Image (spheres, grey):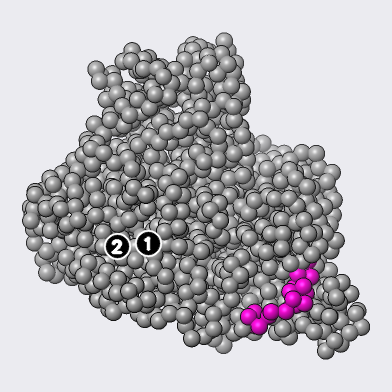
Amino acid sequence: MIVAGIDVGGKNVHTVIVSDGNIIAKAEGPTGIKKAEAAEQFYNEALKQAGLKREDVERVVATGSGGKRATFADGYIADAAADARGVIRLVPSARTIIDVGGEEGRAIKISAEGKVLDFAVNEKCAAGTGTFVDTMARALEVPVEEMAKMSLQSTRSIPMNAQCAVFGESEVVSLIHQKITKHDIARAVHDAIAGRIGSVARIVGLENDLVMIGGVAKNVGFMDSLKRELGMNVVTPDDPDYVGALGAAIAASAGVLEEEVKAKVVEKETIEEGK
Amino acid sequence: MAKYEAKRLDCWGKAKELRAKYYQDYKEAHDRGALRWEGGAWTFDAIPQALEGEVHGLTEEPYGASVGANPEVQVRYQEAAEGKWGCANDLCAYLRNYWGSIILNEFVFGGEWPKADFIFQNHICCSHAKWLQVAAEIEGGDVPFFCFDVGVGAYDKIAERQINFVVEQLYDGIDFLEKATGRKLDDEKLIQNVKNTYDSSCYWAKTCMLNQAIPAPLDEKTMFSLYVLGTLEKSNKDVANFYKNELYPEVKDRVANKIAAVGDEQCRMLGDSQPPWAFLSVYRYLEQYGVVSVANLYTFSLIGWWKIDEQGNMVPYPTLEEQGITIKDRDHALRLLTEGELKGKLMWAPFYGANYKNDLVTKIAKQWKCDAAILHLNRGCEGTAQHQMEMKIALQNMGMPAMTFEGNMADERQFDEPRTKRLIDLFITETLGLKKVAG
Amino acid sequence: MEASEILKQFNDVWELRHEYAKDWKQRTGGKVVGYFCTYAPEEVLYAADILPIRILGAHETPNLASPHIFDMWCPFCRDCLNQGLQGKYDGYLDGIMETNSCLHARQAFGAWVIHVPTPWNYWFVMPNAVRSPRAKSFLRGELADFKKAIEEWTGKTITDQDLDKGIDIMNTNRRLMKQVYEFRKQDNPPITGTEAMTMVWASQLMDKREHNELLKQLIEALPDRKLDRDTGVRLMIIGSENDDRPFMEMVEDVLKGTFVTDDHCTGSRYFWDEVVPEKDRLQAIANRYLDRVPCPNKDWGMEDCSKKRFPHILQLARDYGVQGAILVQQKFCDPHELDIPSLRRYLEDNGIPCYFLEFEVTVPVGQFRIRVEAFLEQIEAEELFA
Amino acid sequence: MAETKAVEFWRWPETSWVNPDIDWQKGQLITAGVDVGSVSSQTVVMVDGKLYAYSNTRTGSDSPDSAWKCTNMALEKSDLTVDNFDYCIGTGYGRVNVPMAQQTITEIACHARGANFMYGPEIKTVLDMGGQDCKAIHCDDRGKVLKFMMNDKCAAGTGRGMEVFADLIQIPVWEIGPRSFQIEKEPPDISSTCVIFAKTEVIGLLEEGVPENEIMAAYCAAMAHRITELLNRLGVEEKFAITGGIAKNIGVVKRLEEEIKTKSAEANWYDPDMRDKGLPFDTQIAGGIGAALFAKAMLERGKAKSARKA
């Protein structure tokens, strides 16, 4: 059976096409402003790669903060749920998941079956999100990848008060003025986010194996800081940023989506009656 | 086809009517030569209401909540408090609504701010005394202010000394009232008011007890609009009668006839702290999944009086009749009133440690047969938000799925509705594995 | 001993507080009890030969505290709990107590009792209505219960003589620290605000008998001490607790200002008032805690909206020739948040310029520097204008 | 990638100007003010207290470099060099790292003094909207600070916030103001002014097909509202002047004036002479002007000695 999963995040869209449990094609790109179109575009891209036509795909499930914009999908699944399904497939021993995306950092506790037992998100603040990393990289005037590598060469840790992304910036600026090396600043930034994510993760409890997914998992500097913060091993699957999409695809192959589809409709109604 | 018959309460209208009258009376008090006083929902209103002649009070928390239910007004009032007065925006949201209301000289129920003749307050959380102390300052500093301390220890530590301390302060309070108003305290009134307070407090607890039934006859959303009367004037005869002779019998009857608050009840939820008042739609949202909020330490004992019986269960505090007591005189009245509040108001226990809250909340979860907990981390009220994370751990340790969401009872700027709904979806569909109920 | 040498010893105790307490235990075999709020009646603890130490901040982001206290609660309290959870007090802290202080400290205590292995804990009901005459007999009763509980725990009865000892240790410490504060009235104080505050921290962390000996030597040595620095603007720092050294240093070392006095519970508010001896020792102790400069949380009266603390602060400002006050508030600290708008008006109406800063566990020095610097300029800039 | 392309949208164009009517050789005192802000830097050179030259550039990640770049740009059309400065004062976020400065003074003092020079002595309240700080200042008729307040540890409603926004909707930051008035109906509310969460909200609105101009109007309104909250804390006394980058954003300024029911002083020189000559008026150089004037005052009052090298 051929199914597809589409993760429409705040920053990027990830699409996978899965045939009998194996990923046969994947595509990613910036979400931009027109999420629906982006979703469409990168879905088609993946199809092209796989040499498939829409009708070849049995079911498509979307996830992510913009998932419900992918109207062509047969259903929608909450991002944490997609994470859980994706991770348990890739790392059956996983019990704790950390997912740091562009707009939200979250931690999920899962059962051996991949059921979501508990979860926590870092509320109302950009510190502890991918966006924070990007903003700081810009303040340092280096590409994110660069900043990641730099922090590995740092020798000292500087506490950084990372409440607000923009003030994080001004702190970076004042650190620069204090003649602190970019290496050390880069580490300070990663330590700050790792600290925030770490405390979110502790809320659900740190049970092995701990798996880190999401785009930021590719940031070696952050991963280094996170391991130091948590004092435990952190597993990162290949393509950590595709896990959500994979999870959606797995949900697609499992079926039972009528609920989800209905959910979209009912939700609208209740919001109207709400006030 | 819903599982159970569901219908709205008959006494609903009466509750709304009493509430409206309360604020109307306060507003018009001076036109009728009546006295006006400001206090808290936990103030012993039986005492100032026992002054000779006509007296009307305004309790601060319910007022702040009424403002909170109206986002537009609320933001305006809070910005006045934060901007014009200059207070921090993380202070109690009710308090900011209240101060802002005075600063803008607007009464949320219409007209100018009705300045009080005196303040009669009591103190247990960090904000109570200061709340009206500063209010008096904003009002010009000339409002006589009295506040007594009820932070004397948890319900299981209440003995002679604790009761004496409060009663002695109440005597001082009576001197204050008579000096400030030039009116005498009427002992007959006082005795009647204390009786009423007992009825309001004990019958509310009895009513909450009935919610142990399946299906639950009441959901929290409804209970919120019912306990409010007890936060306004529990010593009032009409209020006492409402709880004793209208609400309690009706709910009892619902249980007997299996009439549910939510026809599709399939998951009984435990809540904590106040909800974000402007977003009660969240409860409607839950109902689509057959999730009914049936229990909450806050809702039960904000006004309800309870005790822990030999089996260690939470049971309603006995009424005066049940205790076979007739109030003899002023002293007797003050002691009984103090005893009931200090021993019965379990809501005060968490002020003395997380263990108290964990103990009470796990009792409630068991006795009210709760399946899951959705806890509102309430940035608007330290008092009701005490030990919430500890409580989550305690509930999870007893095997109950629990989720938290951050919000604020009366500051919409601190509540993210779409995100909260996303989290609730996740919790209910994934963790609880529930599906939306048909219809 | 040189003043600087003594001050360094205070600093060492502050920096190596756990090592100090462990060593003290070793030497004396006595018990150590931690407390969060300065309303803890230390007299009774000293009477029982127990070392009371205050749980103070470490200024690391309290990541371990998040599962127990969510982040609307005061960062200082989360910081305190965090150290307990990190095991910093393991192996030497015999007891922990809390005293009806703010709701925030109660969160830390509540979680501590459950998650930080501590053999003994006690909730001390310190009345909120400290300005009510009725509180006196009530608190005396609470003190009697407290004394009894300690006697049961330690197996040693506390006599009046023991209480006198406890009172004497505390009073001597208060008197001596007040004498040190006297030096801060000079045009060029021989002791900086950072140093003075370090002295108070040390007093909350070490055996006051030892602290007293050091204080006596310090008072001997201070007259000969000349600081090679410009006093600059005479500042007063006002707030809840402030154990934030980087901030103090930034103002005094980098900028041209000196803290010459304070109203803080890691400062004067902690030690300003002495126990007035009475035949009934417990009553004497009770009176001291009720009559002391109150925490805003307890500063409310029985007749009007007057505040007892305000005139006291103004008096301090005048006695110490204060040119400007910095109002420091721990984020989410309700008691102080409730007083600050009134206090600010009160001081400014009395000719004391104020600047307000909100603190967290880690201080963004960069952001605070410009604010304080501009405040100092506001006070001093006259020279740049005709 | 997208990031770098978008960058240009939040860049204000860099400018520099030299006063053709002044022969600096004839001047007694040549003083300068270098304002290295977190986002932009300005150098102002004054000859005997008259505006001689200035530049307005972007701040880089290294303050000394930024200070040099900015100062060189100010002097590029003149034969005057840094060595001719009698005294130079650094201000702004990077003030401690201004190589050519002998002293530093905060931008709060400098903006108040600069506003007094630019807008005149009736100015009682100054709003300086910098990159990451928003400052509300009360000053006397000499431009001396009497009281001031700054935004808390949240950057909502700062210049940087507006830039992130421009970056997001990919509209040059200088176009946002004017376009925010070209709307048919009242814009929706943007409740969260947090730079990051506003972003999510804005994207939401764009998705719902709300016209860009309306969204700009919404953002300007939200920002004006944030600033009002700060101004309310201090209290606005007439006359009221706005300095810094935001003063150039009519979309925010107009809405701010409506909210606080106070008009801000016209953006033109108080000095009739400068006004008539039509000297360029850049609200961002207030800090530099203040610094240069303080430098002059220090020399005249003997608080400092000339550091002139040539």
Q: Nearer the viewer, mark 1 or mark 2?
A: 2
Residue at screen point 48% across, 40% down: C109
Q: On the picture, is A36 further left or further right than C221?
A: right
Q: To which quarter of the image does residue C40 belong?
A: top left
The mark found on residue C345 in the picture is none
Q: Secondary structure at mark 1?
A: helix
Residue A251 included in the magenta stretch of the image: yes
- Mark 1 and mark 2: Cα distance apart in space: 13 Å
Residue at screen point 32% across, 40% down: B157
Residue B256 higher or lower than C356, as above or below: below
Q: On the picture, is A21 further left or further right than D296?
A: right
Q: Secondary structure at mark 2?
A: helix
* Location of residue C140 in the rendering, given as x and y in whole percent from the top left corner: 28, 29
* Pointer 2 local density, CA inside 10 Å: few below 14, some 14–19, many at least 20: many
Q: To which quarter of the image does residue B102 belong?
A: bottom left
Residue D294 included in the magenta stretch of the image: no
* Location of residue D3 in the rendering, given as x and y in whole percent from the top left corner: 79, 67
Q: To which quarter of the image does residue D235 belong?
A: bottom left
Residue C205 higher or lower than A197, as above or below: above
Callout 1, which amino acid?
A: Thr
Q: On the picture, is A158 further left or further right than B389?
A: right
Are discs 1 and 2 located on one and the same chain? Answer: yes
- What chain letter is assigned to the residue under label 1? B
Callout 2, which amino acid?
A: Lys
The mark found on residue B299 in the picture is 1
* Location of residue C311 in the rendering, given as x and y in whole percent from the top left corner: 32, 37
Residue range in magenta is A243-261
The mark found on residue B206 in the picture is 2
- Near-viewer residue (A19 or D263): A19
Residue B354 higher or lower than B188, as above or below: above
Q: On the picture, is B161 further left or further right than D132?
A: left
